[in-house]
Amino acid sequence: MLYRPHCTNRLLTSVVLAVATMGAGMALAATDAKTIHMIPQGDLKILDPIQNPSYITRNHGYMVYDTLFAQNSKGEVKPQMIDAYKVSADKKVWTFTLRAGLKWSDGTPVTAADCVASIKRWAARDVSGRLLAAAIGELKAVDASTFTITLAKPFGPVIEMLGKPSSNVPFMMPERVAKTEPTEQIKDTTGSGPFIFKKDEWVPGSKVVYVKNPHYVPRKEPADGLAGGKVVHVERVVWNFIPDQNTALSAFKGGEMDVYELPPADFLDPLTKDANVKLAVDPLGNQGWLRPNHQLPPFNHPKARQALTYLVNQDEYLAAAGFPAKYRHPACMAYFMCGSVNDTKAGAQAYQGGQNLEKAKQLLKEAGYKGEKVVVLAPSEPPIQAAAALVTIQNLKKIGVNVEAQAMDWGTLQARRAKKDGWNIFHTYSVGADVYSPAVNAYAQASCEAAPSGWPCDAELEKLRADWVAESDPAARKQLTDAIQTRMYEVVPYVNFGQFFQPMAYRSNLSGVLNVGIPVMWNVEKK
């Protein structure tokens, strides 16, 4: 879940303290060519990107750790820490060899045993990692630089899963760290990536500091997406957390900050008109989710969930969240993101006409709805989820639903949605990198008790997903993608309320900024 800071009176005191703590560092930001100052999307509280999937922790992970494989700007998976790999003729045995000279940030060599332990820990936590782990018969280090994966059953996207770009990312850690129980937080932040986390300068609620890793060995290819050479041109990167968005905007426009990771939607037009500002737009964007509780009436009936699909006008949701038209994808019906390798219209034909309130009302009646209370969890923030909840509440009332809007903050909502009773609908969204395939889209799961909050339960959908990950032929996988989406429109694990783009803003004196939807600071130069 992305955390979006939101302006509240409660935070004004912390704003003043945060700005005071930054002090001279902020004033020097415009002239210090060796330091990049960034306003992050939130406050970094948790340092373990395997145990915790939050995007702020994932972003921290990309600063500190490297990956075996990575996606380039075309979505192709390329070797990163890996030098070479091969697969046996029967596609059961995969052999991987690390690049020569790789070192941890403490100067010790990276070994195959480190990577084996890291893969195992990641696979215990990640939705796609668990699919891969279920197919593995043996994972072992052969020597200091080589390891093998031997499959016990067919699994097509081995490389795609090891190159998964977003939460949870299979970051490589030293074996001693990776042996930490997957449910426990790591304490050692020794990394394999281009920066070192300065724990001694970390001020929770205010500042996070990274310095260039002198032991990091980048690839020789140019940076391309998340792949290629991660060459660092600066000495330090400082994340300055400013919870009040107006204060943040002022610091950025005044040149005290170099990067504004996720400016609110209503700031985008003014920033576009500023000659000193540029925007980096993730080409996949984000997907909004309306998640019904499949365990309780009325949405334990598929027709009631289909009614929710007819309830949605995507432009209405995204406009309510403040996104100008140019930052919305027009009526995207692809569960796995419009513009991705798995983009398809299969199963969506009945909904191509857009919002149909009468059809929604009819389907609810057919599902047996008779005026029972429908509880919508309505957060005060973050703003996108808050706006989406209000739109859904309004549209449910239009079709005669007895709605109870329960107001709460986002932390309370996260706790409430973990309980199987007491609620019917909540809203959230995800970056495209966490949605673009049946293997990585956690909310596409229909595994009953094992699925995320909402708990869809459909054996046919789960079999299709299992068939998808077992398939290695692209054409056959495409057919399965169509079949999966068709089934999803029948089962409706969630409703897509719109695909949208929330750019990262940066000062025009920066060059080499990568449009990857993640604020990576390699390849960036500051004048």
Image (cartoon, rainbow, N blue to C red):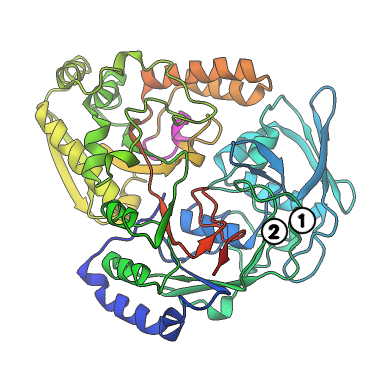
Q: Is residue 428 magenta?
A: no
Q: How far across and down, in percent of the image, does residue 218 sit?
A: 73, 57
Q: Neighbour class for label 2 at 10 Å: few (<14), some, many (≥20)?
A: many
Question: Of 148 and 280, which appears nearest the observer?
Answer: 280
Three-letter code, disc 2: Met
Q: Earlier in the sequence, mark 1 or mark 2?
A: 1
Is 476 above or below relative to 413? above
- Residue hosting label 1: 114
Q: Quadrant of residue 235?
A: bottom right
Identify the element where label 2 is drawn: loop
Q: Which residues are magenta?
A: 443-454
- Residue hosting label 2: 173
Three-letter code, disc 1: Asp
Q: How far across and down, in percent of the image, does residue 311 sit?
A: 22, 27
Q: Residue at x 66, y 34 (%)?
A: 134
Q: Residue at x 40, y 15 (%)?
A: 347
Question: Of 370 and 55, which appears nearest the observer?
Answer: 55
